[in-house]
Image: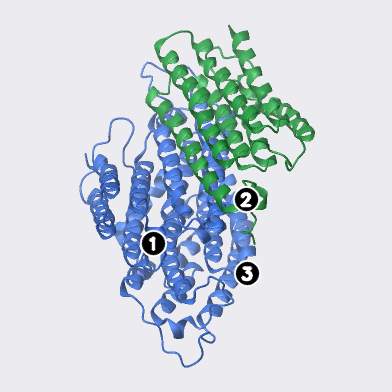
Chain colours: A blue, B green
Amino acid sequence: MALAAIVLVPVIGSLAGLLIGSRNARMGVLVLASLLHLALVSGLWVRETPAGLGPIALMDPLGQLVLTVVSAVFLATSIYLVQYRHLTPPRTTRTFLVPLLLLSLAAMSAVCMARHLALLWVSSGGLTLSVAPLVFLQRGRRSLEAAWKYLMLSCVGVAIALLGIFLVAIAANAQPARESAASPLQLDELLLRAHAGRMDVAWLRAGFICMLVGFGTKVGLAPMHTWKPDTYAEAPVPVAALMATALANCALLCVLRGYQVCVAAGEGEFAGRLLLVLGLTSIGVAAAFMAFQTDARRLLAYSGVEHVGVIALGVGIGGRACFGALLHLVGHSLAKLVLFFAVGNVAYAYRTRSILDITGVLRRMPLSGVLLVCGFTATVGFPPFSIFVSELTIVAAAVSARQNLVAVLALALLSLAFIGVIANALAMAHGDDPRGGDAPPERESRLLVVPGYVLLVLLAAIGVHLPSALGDALIRAAAVLGG
Amino acid sequence: MSTLADSLLVLAVFVGLYMLASGDLPAVIRATAVQGAALSLVPLVVEGLDAHAVAIAGVALAIKVFVLPALLFAAVRRAGVVRDIEPLVGYGSSVVLGGLVIAASFVLAAPLKVPGGEMPSLLVPSAFSTVLLGLVLIVTRTKALTQVAGFIVLENGVYIFGVPLIRDVPILVELGILLDAIVAVFIMGIVIHHISRAFDHIDTHVMTALRD
């Protein structure tokens, strides 16, 4: 029942949002539904594992971890949206915003608890489609172009992912089924057959490659990342923030489900190597584009490419690095949200997203300025924030797994990314206020900065001392991936 | 029996090639319908006339032959475009490209034999061909609508790979997959509508404001 409620609450909220005429009431529904969702998800940690919904839905440690991050991120974003909607033209808060956001939350919850690859795929496709209309809420030429690229690329990606799922299922049919005859699309049945060595390796490999390319397009791993900068820059800030964190995590989970099957079938090394290569490519491409970036939101998008790359790299290295990758997933979600909120505030006040025109943020907007600087230092892996710990764990695991070349490459590329991000961050934070030297600081709305500060404190707390409950959860989730 | 299924698959691949050679949007849309019809019948031929296969084939037929083309024709009317002139790659060259892609599919399919069951021998190569032809169509054409048609061809190719799994896929899941395609094409139609209003055209290669 608990699992059904987690999907149903946002669905009901979405319907309510459609029926309610008043904008404020719709916002109330959004915040209420996301609060309730987080409460239900937190309940999963306290009580015993709830019963699954037949063979199609069940919580495993990995799904539960991602779902918790998704739920927390969604709540923070909806609180931010309450005030942010006053900053944008009324178009952006049209009737569909709240219902579609809640629909995407329902789809993400379904992705996290899916134990049937078809359900995983259908909810992941539904997720893409529920978010696509939000990208072009503003109807400008630029957002239309971004929406078209997003729609076309992710629909093609999702179709290729389905191909991958079919190929994996065909691989599992290599030997005639026993009398149980559970569907080979069911994750548990797949894992069972994989463990028993009843998978056809050629089909499995082809299937994983298709799943990696397809879902990887949604994750935004290079070289399938091209839609990401456009979409993150043109979509409304809260939507972009959700896409960069919650949606990317769900897509990653889909890739990891394929990886899980490969590990069970003894093909973990093959799949891991692919993840590793894509991960390093992503970090490299992002580092190259971040150094000369002039658009603050595109900078965030490339930083997103870098960090999903780090996660893929961690999973690819395997062992202890899996733990690091999952910790990185948590840390990156929090840090990226802080940055989107800060950049959203700053870009609104300066009426531009160009890094060249945004100067003196610390003086003009002290509250958002601190968020901006801390957010950027957190993303590049400065202590005390948890990204420092996770990146260190991944690199250390690479060294102890005797993958020295990988460790060196990763460190070099991460340093390049570091330089690109920090140079841009400092340029924005310092310098002269374009309004003139004596202008007083702007008044900043509390609701626009408080969510960011809460996330930042959380991020630092995890970095300084990993709570044992979270540590256990990460270890159990990493164990799912053979780490 | 297997020959009939193979003929349907070959027909689907040839329709894909025809789409590469054509710049007439209504013809391209009708071609997706023909291809969809041919492929919807494959499960019936392979599995025989049992209830499950008939249900799946019926739903697929209705959606691929009527719903999706209707959505595309509606988009054509609203955008007022009927020809995809000025493709990035000429029609002749894209057919040659299509031929190469089909050859590549046979190479790709060589190590992959469908385990169990008696499947048409051309199933794997034709599925790969259709998927890749769809991709070629998306990449080489400039009109947003032709790209949507390419997406439908791609989906058709994926559908072929669903045939060996027909016993393992519940009808509800099949419906979900087809519904997803409908909603995708529907939303693409809406975006195309807004694009044609904002830009006075639906040429995706002119939309280049966003770049690094």
Q: CA distance from mark 3 to mark 2?
A: 18 Å
Amino acid type assigned to the residue bearing label 1 in the image: Pro
Circle nearer the viewer, 1 or 3:
1
Does the image show residue A174? no
Amino acid type assigned to the residue bearing label 3 in the image: Ala
- Discs 3 and 2 lie in a common subunit: yes
Tag 1 secondary structure: helix
Q: Position of residue B2 (x, y in %)?
A: 60, 9
- Residue that carries the numbered disc 2 in the rendered image: A223
Query: Of all residues shown, which one is farthest toward the top?
Result: B1
Viewer-closest of B77 and A170: B77
Circle nearer the viewer, 2 or 1:
1
Q: CA distance from mark 2 to mark 1?
A: 36 Å
- Residue that carries the numbered disc 1 in the rendered image: A90
Q: Position of residue A16 (x, y in %)?
A: 25, 47
Which residue is pictured at 51% across the width and 25% down the height? B64
* A111 is higher (above) or lower (below) than A464: above
Instruction: Give the numbered dot on residue A198.
Output: none
- Residue that carries the numbered disc 3 in the rendered image: A291
